[in-house]
Image (cartoon, grey):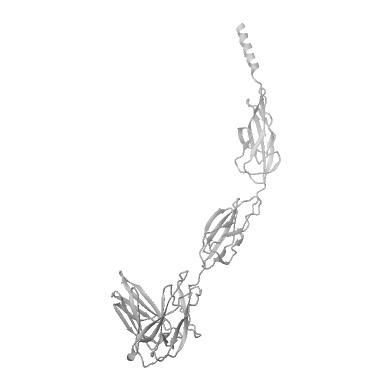
């Protein structure tokens, strides 16, 4: 009996040593605060205070949360949580939500908190970005540098919004996208081409995804800078010699020639002649030449050295490139004009050669009457003679010597062309092209050596 009493006393002593567990405190201090408005619809954290005492220790209460938009029937949102608690879903804009918390201690003694509510923000209205404007270069601008940089005015009417820009650029009137997500209102397209029209457009997009497209603008780059041809050298006179009636030799025909100067831009060129007596010939276009090409101008004849009367003329020439840039006039070449005596009619030979061929023109009373061609190598070739209208009037194929006779009243005007082709591999390739003319204004003048 005594042992039983001892056991009972021990149990009562141990019980008196366990800490006292108090009830859970009523939930309080809610966040969002009760009745709050303008609450964001996303990322909401619900928080509150609730503790219970275990002896002299304060412990956060475990809680069940009830949350919804119907105040008469608020469903449970979560259980067994402690403050705070984040709502993972997006709420509706401009709606009032109700909530309360039931707290309990470790003995599951519960305390129901008061009902709270808050209202979310009204649906946010976002304005689209400003329409891109004030383009530079201005719309329709011309003669722009090939190193031009593009710029524009952008922005957004909503404070705090950020805007990114998308650049469409090219030679098509519907230009392609070339750059995205630009933070600045400028874009460098790199080196452009001369004399080209470019089109461009800017699209602006804000951080809410709203987009505003600008108009399609255009500008044109300027022409490539061009320099005039170099000054041509003085014309050169060459002579054929004839021995009629045992006279000492004398110049019978004057051949005037010149070599085209170089053009800094390697442009094709045209030429004209100033005869020194107030006459300037038309430009040679559409017959164009390049630097190093030669012109050959055949004049009339002079027959008698004892008849030394006549007039001196100063010849000079000028070239221009295809962009109408003019060279300086050449220095003047003085040539004396004598008199023609029709009793002497003969063929005059003008000889020249290069690495491919030998040719001469025969001259008779102001008309070319014979053309002779042979290759230095003696190999075969094709030859064609084109009149001023570029019609073939003479041709020889697979020839070793060409000896053409012809008379043409049109030979005094325009440009005649001789083309020689040589076999290279399996094909005939142009190896020599020569254009010649009787210069306008010269055909009635008979030139002699000075």
**Screen quadrant of the N terminus:** top right
Q: Quadrant of the C terminus?
A: bottom left
Please indicate whether residue 192 sits to the left or right of residue 154 in the image: left
Decide if residue 1 is in sight here: no
The answer, for residue 36, to whether it is visible in the render is yes
Residue 337 versus residue 220 in the image, above or below: below
Of residues 348 and 174, the one nearer the viewer is 348
Is 108 or 427 nearer to us in this picture?
427
Of 7 and 38, nearer the camera is 38
Residue 106 sits in which quadrant? top right
* Residue placed furthest toward the top: 2
Which residue sits at x=62%, y=6%? 2
- Picture coordinates of residue 206, whole percent (x, y): 60, 52
Occupied quadrant, residue 156? bottom right
- From what the image shows, is residue 64 above or below residue 130? above
Q: In this view of the protein, which residue sits in the foreground, 156 or 369?
A: 369
> What residue is shown at x 60% (from left), y 42% (from top)?
89
Height in image: 223 above or below 358?
above
């Amino acid at each position: 009996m005594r042992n039983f009493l001892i056991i009972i006393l021990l149990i009562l002593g141990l019980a008196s040593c366990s800490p006292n567990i108090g009830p859970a405190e009523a939930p309080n201090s809610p966040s969002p605060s009760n009745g709050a408005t303008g609450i964001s619809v996303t990322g909401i954290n619900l928080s509150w205070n609730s503790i219970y005492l275990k002896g002299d220790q304060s412990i956060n209460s475990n809680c069940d949360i009830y949350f919804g938009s119907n105040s008469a029937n608020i469903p449970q949102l979560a259980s067994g949580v402690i403050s705070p608690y984040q709502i993972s879903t997006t709420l509706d804009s401009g709606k009032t939500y109700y909530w309360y918390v039931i707290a309990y201690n470790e003995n599951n003694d519960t305390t129901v908190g008061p009902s709270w509510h808050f209202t979310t923000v009204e649906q946010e209205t976002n304005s689209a970005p400003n329409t891109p404007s004030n383009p530079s270069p201005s719309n329709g601008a011309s003669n722009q540098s090939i190193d031009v940089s593009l710029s524009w005015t952008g922005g957004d009417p909503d404070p705090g919004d950020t805007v990114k820009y998308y650049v469409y650029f090219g030679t098509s009137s519907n230009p392609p996208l070339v750059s995205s997500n630009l933070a600045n209102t400028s874009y460098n397209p790199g080196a452009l081409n001369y004399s080209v029209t470019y089109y461009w457009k800017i699209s602006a997009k804000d951080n809410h995804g709203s987009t505003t497209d600008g108009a399609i603008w255009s500008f044109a780059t300027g022409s490539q800078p061009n320099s005039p041809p170099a000054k041509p050298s003085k014309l050169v006179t060459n002579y054929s010699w004839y021995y009629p009636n045992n006279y000492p030799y004398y110049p019978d025909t004057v051949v005037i020639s010149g070599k085209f100067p170089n053009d800094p831009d390697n442009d094709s060129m045209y030429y004209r002649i100033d005869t020194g007596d107030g006459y300037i010939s038309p430009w040679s276009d559409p017959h164009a030449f390049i630097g190093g090409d030669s012109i050959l101008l055949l004049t009339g004849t002079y027959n008698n050295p004892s008849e030394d009367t006549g007039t001196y003329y100063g010849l000079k020439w000028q070239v221009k490139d295809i962009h109408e840039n003019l060279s300086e006039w050449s220095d003047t070449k003085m040539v004396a004009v004598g008199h023609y005596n029709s009793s002497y009619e003969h063929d005059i030979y003008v000889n020249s050669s290069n690495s491919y061929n030998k040719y001469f023109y025969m001259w008779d009373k102001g008309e070319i009457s014979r053309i002779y061609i042979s290759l230095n190598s003696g190999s075969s070739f094709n030859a064609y003679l084109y009149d001023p209208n570029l019609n073939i009037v003479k041709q020889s194929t697979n020839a070793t010597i060409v000896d053409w006779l012809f008379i043409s009243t049109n030979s005094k005007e325009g440009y005649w062309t001789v083309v020689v082709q040589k076999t290279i591999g399996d094909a005939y390739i142009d190896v020599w092209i020569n254009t010649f003319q009787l210069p306008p204004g010269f055909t009635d003048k008979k030139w002699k050596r000075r």
